[in-house]
Image (cartoon, helix red, strand yellow):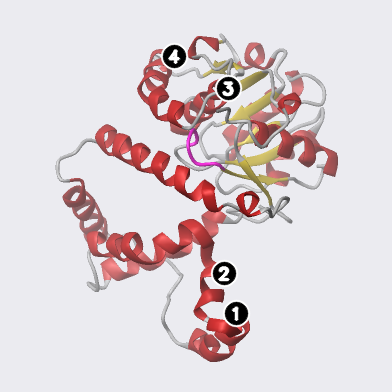
Amino acid sequence: MSRQDTAAAADVPARVAVIGTGVIGNGWIVRALAAGCDVVAFDPAPGAEATTRAFVERVWESVATMGLADTADPSRLRFAASAIEAVEEADLVQENVPERLEIKHRVLAELDAHAPEGVVIGSSTSGIKPSELQSACTRDPGRVIVAHPFNPVYLLPLVELVGGEHTAPVVTERARAQYAALGMRPLVVRREIEGHVADRLMEALWREALHLVNDGVATTEEIDAAVVYGAGLRWSLMGTFLTFHLAGGEGGMRHMLHQFGPALKLPWTKLEAPELTDELIEKVADGCEHQAAGRSVADLETRRDAFLTELLALTRKYWPEAEGLEGRI
């Protein structure tokens, strides 16, 4: 089964350029290869190519269980000697350099200057607004947009697309079609904001979790258990709002807000992050190491990927299009 079963084959970019091959960049490489694209990558770090090829080999089996395009082949990956060479003849460019604005500016300006006319340049930035990214580009800044994925990119389908002040709707629509053709679920964010949508939600939970550890209310393991065995199971199908809609009974969200809305005034959350003292850092790090139970990060990633492939196979049966709700996110 193809990963492109919900997208037009004509929208699949024939060649994807990936600039920066860390965890996120490598994830994009695998996703594009799985969709049957040629991938040209560039990363100036010593040993980057060997690391990437080993990564592709390690995760390919997990990706294959999700379905590959007929033309999917890891051998379609090659490394370029420069970013300029990498974007030559590219149909889509994905930037994944470190989250520092001065580095983003330098790299994106170069990509904009040399990528073929009209080609979308997506940035994997987790928090920078697209207008800030565009400010260093002089040729066609509007095509530089946020295309923020989630790790592991080769399995998790969400990509947040955010246009900046120079971005025309046709650019966003072209990007939406191309990322959908890579098997993604594009979420076009209505207006730019730091952290976009999903990271702002995760950051709120993360800050509260740090407070609970810092205040001695719970350990990292206990907090994760609260998510894994509770809300997390519902969130994987219904998210936040639909979960609370059901909590309102037959009256739905309207009853929920009328009955429990006043509780929003109670001091249940702090939101502002606690100070990262040495003591708090040790508590959090020790807790995570206890949870890992001697397993390496690679072992935990393999376990995570196996779980996600099974979970995605299940949740897809309940996605909107499976219920005839075409056009929904």
Residue type at mark 2 is Phe
Residue 46 locus on image (x, y percent): 40, 15
Element marked by disc 3? loop
Kindly check if marks 2 and 1 are in contact, taking CB atoms under 8 A apart as contact: yes
Comes first in the chain, label 2 or label 1: 2
Residue type at mark 1 is Met
Return the residue at label 4: 49
Residues 298 and 289: in front is 298
Which image quadrant: the N terminus? top right
Return the residue at label 1: 253
Between the residue at mark 3 and the residue at mark 4, the CA separation in whole angstroms equals 24 Å
Tell whether position 181 is magenta: no
Element marked by disc 1? helix
Residue 7 locus on image (x, y percent): 69, 34
The magenta-colored residue range is: 153-157
Residue 190 locus on image (x, y percent): 73, 56
Nearest-to-viewer mark from 2 and 4? 2
